[in-house]
Amino acid sequence: SIPDPVEGEASEQLQAAVKRFKPGEYFDPEASEREHFYEVCWSCFGYREDAVEELRRWKALRSSLDDQDEVLWMTNPLEYEVNFRACIDRNAQFLDLLPTPDVCGAQ
């Protein structure tokens, strides 16, 4: 038996791609890369909603801290939230410039 020259995660991904391959189909070794690219593109479209949800979770966690844990946080919660929202806005503005549905939907 010839040893697999690719080790680790790349080997596992290749093996998974080969298992999905059906006889008679065109084997596209770039298919998983393209699929990942599409997932990344589409995730950009929901960034603002996802980030706001993370902020909501942070606020819920923050409000559940007891006084001793509160002292360990060592930051002003309102200032943190304002900065978090500003970062969300800046990131969303940048991401709005990147992918378009035409690019992400292209096959």
Image (spheres, rainbow, N blue to C red):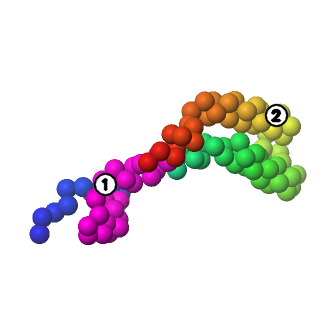
Quarter of the view holding residue 22: bottom left
Q: Which amino acid does label 1 sit on?
A: Asp
- Tell me what residue is drawn at x 72 percent, y 36 percent: 88
Quadrant in which the N terminus is drawn: bottom left
Q: Which of 4 and 22 is in front in this view?
A: 22
Residue 88, compared with residue 53, is above or below; it is above
Q: Nearer the viewer, residue 93 or 67?
A: 93
Q: Distance between the residues labelled 2 and 1?
A: 46 Å
- Please give the label number shown on residue 1: none
In screen coordinates, is 66 left or right of 21?
Answer: right
Q: Nearer the viewer, residue 28 or 55?
A: 28
Which numbered disc, 2 or 1, marks the residue that appears first in the sequence? 1
Q: Position of residue 23 (x, y in %)?
A: 26, 69
Q: Would you say residue 6 sits in the magenta stretch?
A: no
What residue did someone put label 1 on?
A: 28
Quarter of the view holding residue 97: top right
In screen coordinates, is 44 left or right of 28?
Answer: right
Q: Which amino acid does label 2 sit on?
A: Val
Q: Would you say residue 19 sits in the magenta stretch?
A: yes
Q: How many labels does the image show?
A: 2
In screen coordinates, is 45 left or right of 62?
Answer: left
Identify the secondary structure beneath mark 1.
loop
Q: Position of residue 95 (x, y in %)?
A: 62, 34
What residue did someone put label 2 on?
A: 82
Tell us which disc is closer to us: 2 or 1.
1
- Badge 2 crowding class, 10 Å Cα cut-off, few under 14, some 14 to 19, many 20 or more, is few
- Tell me what residue is drawn at x 35 percent, y 67 percent: 20
- Tell me what residue is drawn at x 75 percent, y 50 percent: 53
- In the image, the segment drawn in magenta is 13-38
- Badge 1 crowding class, 10 Å Cα cut-off, few under 14, some 14 to 19, many 20 or more, is few
Identify the secondary structure beneath mark 2.
helix
